[in-house]
Amino acid sequence: MNIKFGASLLSWITPDWNPESGKYAIEKTAKAGFDLIEILLPASMEFNAEEVKKQLKDNNLEAVCSLNLPKEAHIALHPKAAEKLMKQAVNKTSELEADFLGGVLHGGIGVFSGNPLTESEAETIVEVWSKVADYAQEKGVNIGIEPINRYETYVCNTAKNVLDMISKTGKDNLFLHLDTFHMNIEENNFYDPVILAGSKLKHVHMTESHRGMLGEGTVNWQELFKALKEINFEGNLVLENFSSSVPGMQQMVSLWQKSPYDADELALGSLHFMKNHIR
């Protein structure tokens, strides 16, 4: 296996990116001993990639990027807006000299039609993905698409949902981005989706069932790590847990219960947990 351990900036700050908090997240990630930080790009694309690239270099830290499509870029309803935003995110990723863009790239979070995904909607998504994949190929960027739970989208809830649509594009630089929090809701187990994906899995959000310390919830980590070893996983394992000790986090991510750990404790304990399981 060839694995890099990362932390989402959400491990340290709220989803609202700004230069000051971003610098703080980069410094905290490096100090905690991670290989990389996952930078959640703002939908506004107000993001100084050159400045951030210098901060990463100063802290000897790598980066990957992610983007969660907003409601106004829900692909099935607003394909042109979605394509434009995704290409802008590819540009920012390339400017950082990073090679991976992940996230919820199949539909706007919180947008529902009231029905299951239609064939027509799926065709629109495949068309947009294909165009963005070709653009990303020119920039040297791979794209990972993250299925999320039924309470946040009707588009892609499972690994198979994403993999089936990727296969329809025929694009080699589209991959699967899994998240154990969402898998815990939507998948039958943590083994089969990883085996199904094989080399198409490049990025995993390592998140406990309650978004807290890894190993203290209901996620079956033994199944997950067994599957990762069987596919000889090559990619990123990125911590994405939340602490109520971060100002504003409870309101931003509906974290209504007080966390028993602060952000530093969560990050260090969870990184230790991941490395122990890989060993």
Image (spheres, rainbow, N blue to C red):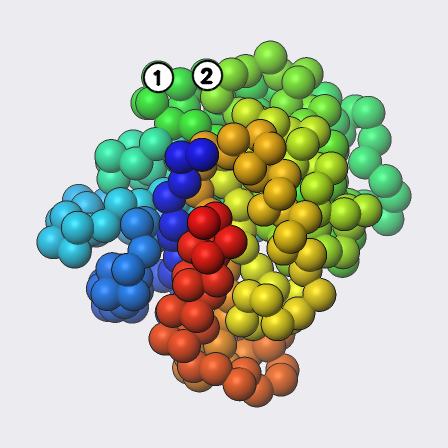
* Residue furthest out toward the front: 279
Mark 1–mark 2 distance (CA, rounded to whole Å): 7 Å
**Residue positioned 41% across, 77% down in the render:** 265
Counting from the top left corner in percent of width and height, residue 108 is at 63, 47
Q: Amino acid at mark 1?
A: Glu
* Residue furthest out toward the top: 170
Which numbered circle lies on residue 134? 2
Comparing 74 with 23, the one in front is: 23
Counting from the top left corner in percent of width and height, residue 67 is at 47, 46
Residue 184 appearing in the image: yes
User: Do residues under tags 1 and 2 come within 8 Å of each other at their CB atoms?
Assistant: yes
Within 10 Å of the Cα at label 1, are there few (<14), some (14-19), or many (20+) other Cα atoms? few
- Mark 1, residue position: 138
Which numbered circle lies on residue 178? none
Q: Is residue 212 above or below residue 91?
A: below
Counting from the top left corner in percent of width and height, residue 149 is at 72, 52
Q: Amino acid at mark 2?
A: Asp
Q: Is residue 72 above or below residue 265?
A: above
Within 10 Å of the Cα at label 2, are there few (<14), some (14-19), or many (20+) other Cα atoms? some
**Residue positioned 49% across, 77% down in the render:** 243
Comparing 144 with 248, the one in front is: 144
The quadrant in which residue 159 appears is top right
Comparing 222 with 100, the one in front is: 222
- 153 to the left or right of 247: right
Comparing 76 with 160, the one in front is: 160
Quadrant placement of the N terminus: top left
**Residue positioned 66% across, 65% down in the render:** 209
Residue 101 appearing in the image: no
- 258 to the left or right of 28: right
Task: Assign a secondary structure to mark 2.
Answer: helix
